[in-house]
Amino acid sequence: MGWRSHHFESLARGLPRGPKSQSGSVAHMIALLARRLAGLLLTLFIVSLLIFTVMDLLPGDPASIMLGTSASPETLAALRHDLGLDQPLILRYGQWLAGVFSGDLGQSYTYGVPVAGLIVERLAVTLPLALMAIVLSVAIALPLGALAAARRGGFLAVLATVFSQISIAVPGFWVGLLLIILFSTTLGLMPAGGFPGWSAGLLPALQALVMPAVALAMPQAGVLTRVARSAVLETMHEDFARTAVAKGLSRNVVLWRHVVPNALIPILTVIGLQFTFLVAGAVLVENVFNLPGLGRLALQALAQRDIIVMQDVVLLFAALVIVMNFIVDLSYLAIDPRMRKAA
């Protein structure tokens, strides 16, 4: 099964690759972007409604959790009124949605501070960590996968297979524990955990994120290596690649100038999925390295039944996934003239 979408393949089949296919109408492109953006906003609205409804259906009373089981019914009722929990569901949803659009994400029940400040503070850790991990993953996987496809049966092909199998099989938090034992406990080269904050300086902050980024990147690099190898192998059998070889171009020129750029669509798809996973799914690694990240905040809010924090963090995760898919779709149009013409 090919990596390209069957829909786009059927529309793009037979379309030329020349300048004519690259010069699309500006008005049509604007209309396409407007439709995609409208679909993105509609999806976000539906997701926000689902998140709010599901959170409201979760068992347990936030007021009871905050005050304990010994609180009197009058005290519980007063706290529920202060938190707005006694209002109808649709009214609370409207107030929450209006706050999201205005930037007022509410007040945390547990921490007693605005949720927006909490999220920004945790994003300052999680977002650079995810970016470092995805850059490291791409830097390892793309050259290794492409060279393994170009040299089938050679040493690099075997190395790519072994690396991808091992890195996928080994959990990221276990890699993190090994890194702590080796580089922190044994060699004393890196901090074992914690985050000093960006105010402590760029170098100390980056040092605190290096080992977590490696632990997060290794499993993702294994997956991306397999995807890159398969995509490059498939592209190498297309007519334009064989024509380039027949013209006498060197193997490296054909690989990096013609084959790899045309194999980027499935690779970009996986990179987009991996980035959202790294932002939302780094809870275990953040706990191993004691990092105050967004995933750890979500876990703490779930344990403490802090509904407003849970709602806002889950909505942010969903928005990141939707926006990243939107960016990946736009990148398809940017790198493949056939898809731009078909769209």
Image (tube, rainbow, N blue to C red):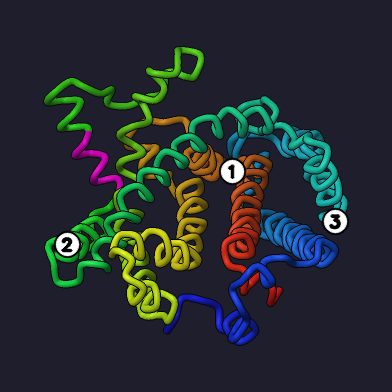
Main SS, magenta residues? helix
Which residue sits furthest top?
200
> Are discs 1 and 2 less than 8 Å apart at CB?
no
Q: Nearer the viewer, mark 3 or mark 2?
A: 2
Which quarter of the rendering shows the N terminus? bottom left
| In front of the other: 40 or 24 | 24
- Judge the density around disc 1: few (<14), some (14-19), many (≥20) Cα neighbours within 10 Å: many
Residue 332 vs residue 16, the one in the foreground: 16
Q: Disc 2 marks which residue?
A: 162
Q: Is residue 7 left or right of residue 276?
A: right
Camera-nearest residue between 137 and 318:
137
Q: Position of residue 244 (x, y in %)?
A: 38, 72
Badge 3 is on which residue? 90
Q: Nearer the viewer, residue 190 or 231?
A: 231
Nearer mark to the viewer, of 1 and 3: 3
Query: In this picture, is 242 found above or below 124?
Result: below
Q: How many marks?
A: 3
Q: Amino acid at mark 2?
A: Val
Quarter-of-image position of residue 205: top left
Above or below, 278 against 268 in this view is above
Residue 151 in percent (x, y) is at 20, 67
Range of magenta residues: 172-179
Q: Between marks 3 and 2, how big is the CA–CA gap?
A: 54 Å
Q: Which residue is mark 1?
A: 305
Q: Amino acid at mark 1?
A: Arg
Q: Earlier in the sequence, mark 1 or mark 3?
A: 3
Q: Secondary structure at mark 3?
A: helix
Numbered disc 1: secondary structure: loop
What residue appears at the point 65 percent right and 54 percent down from the top-left corner?
A: 323
